[in-house]
Image (spheres, rainbow, N blue to C red):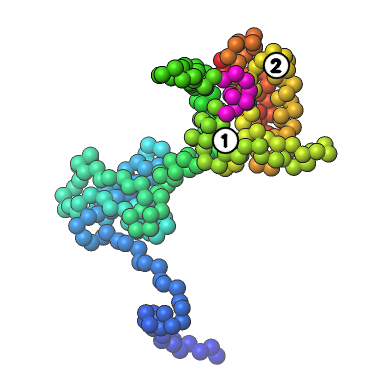
Amino acid sequence: MTDDIKRPKLPAPPPPSPMVRALLRLPEPPPPPRSLASGLWDAQQLCRNGHLLTAHFHDWPPTRRTFCAKCGAAGIHACEECRWEIVGAPRTSVPPRAGHVIPVRPAYCDHCSHPFPWTKPAVESETPTPRNTLTILRELAAQLPTIARELARPYRGGSQGFVVKNEYDAQHLCWALIRARFDDVRLEEPTPSHAGGYGKVDCLLSDEEVGVELKHTRDGLADKEIGDELIEDSVRYAAHPKCRTLFCLVYDPEHRIRNPRGLEKDLSVKHGSMDVVVVIVS
C-alpha cells in the first residue's frame, strides 16, 4: 500500500540576518524588482528599438503590446538586467488618449545603469572599428594638403613656416594629425620574422588594428613605383598580428600620378586576410 498521507509543507527558512551574512561572508541578495503597480507613476512599455507602446502599463492593460506595430520588435517594460520597471506616465483612472502623455525614453536603467536595447547600438558604434577608423583617416587625408599649405606660409615677423619637402616631413605632419585623433599610436612597430629577417611598420593604430603607410611622390616614385612599394609594404604589415587593415596615404602635391582614382582602385585590394585601402591626395 502506498502512503496517501499528505505531509504538510514546511515553511521556507527565513533569510539570514545581516550579522550572520557578514560572519559567513555571504553575498548580498539581489534587489527585488521594482514594480510600479502602486504609486504615483505607472510603468511604460517600449519595443526593443525604443518605440513607445504604452505609457500606462498597469493602469490600462489593453494598451499593452507584445510586438511593435512599427518595426515588429518585442516589447519590454523593465530593465533586462535588474528587472526594474521603466517609469512611464502619471497614474490615471481616465482612459488615456493617444499622444496625451509621452514619457521620457531613458537610455540607461536608473538602478543598475545597464543600457536598454535601443541604446546598445549607439554604444557599440562608439567602439573603434576598422570602418569608423577608415572614415577618420580619410578625413585626415583630405585635410592634409590644406594644412600643409597653411603651415608653409611665413609667420608674422618673418619666421619661416613648416614646408613639407620630402616623405619624412609628410610623415611628421601626418603622425601629428593621427595622434590628435587616436590614443595608442605606435611608430616603427617591429613585426615578426619574415623571410629570414625582421621588419617594421611605420605607424600602427593598436586598438583599431589598422596600419598606416604614407608615400610622398618624387622623381622616381610615381604610378609604377608606388604599386611596387605597396606590394612590399603589404607583406610587412600582414606579418603583424595586430594589423587587419592597411591604410596607405599617397601625398602627391606636384600631381605626378596621372590617374589617381584609377590607381586607388587598382591598389585597394585584399592581401591575404588584410584589407588594403589606398587614398591619393594632392
How packed is label 1: few (under 14 Cα within 10 Å), some, or many (20 or more)?
Answer: some
Q: Secondary structure at mark 2?
A: loop
User: Residue at coordinates 51% horizontally, 26% vertically from top-left?
Assistant: 140
Q: Main secondary structure of the magenta part?
A: helix
> Which of the 4 image quadrants contains residue 257?
top right
Image quadrant in which the N terminus is located: bottom right
Q: Position of residue 259 (x, y in %)?
A: 64, 10
In the image, which residues are magenta? 164-172
Image quadrant in which the C terminus is located: top right
User: Residue at coordinates 60% horizontally, 41% vertically from top-left?
Assistant: 206
Three-letter amino acid code of the residue under disc 1 = Pro
Instruction: From this view, report whether residue 37 is shown above or below residue 206.
Output: below
Q: Does the image show residue 124? A: yes
Q: Which residue bears the numbered disc 1?
A: 130
Q: Which residue bears the numbered disc 2?
A: 221
Q: Does the magenta run of residues contain 3?
A: no
User: Residue at coordinates 45% horizontally, 77% vertically from top-left?
Assistant: 26
Q: Does the image show residue 280? A: no
Three-letter amino acid code of the residue under disc 2 = Leu
Which numbered circle lies on residue 169? none
Q: Secondary structure at mark 1?
A: helix
Instruction: From this view, report whether residue 29 is shown above or below residue 115.
Output: below
Q: Nearer the viewer, residue 47 or 9?
A: 47
Q: Is the Cβ of the residue at disc 1 closer than 8 Å to that at disc 2?
A: no
Q: Position of residue 239 (x, y in %)?
A: 73, 38
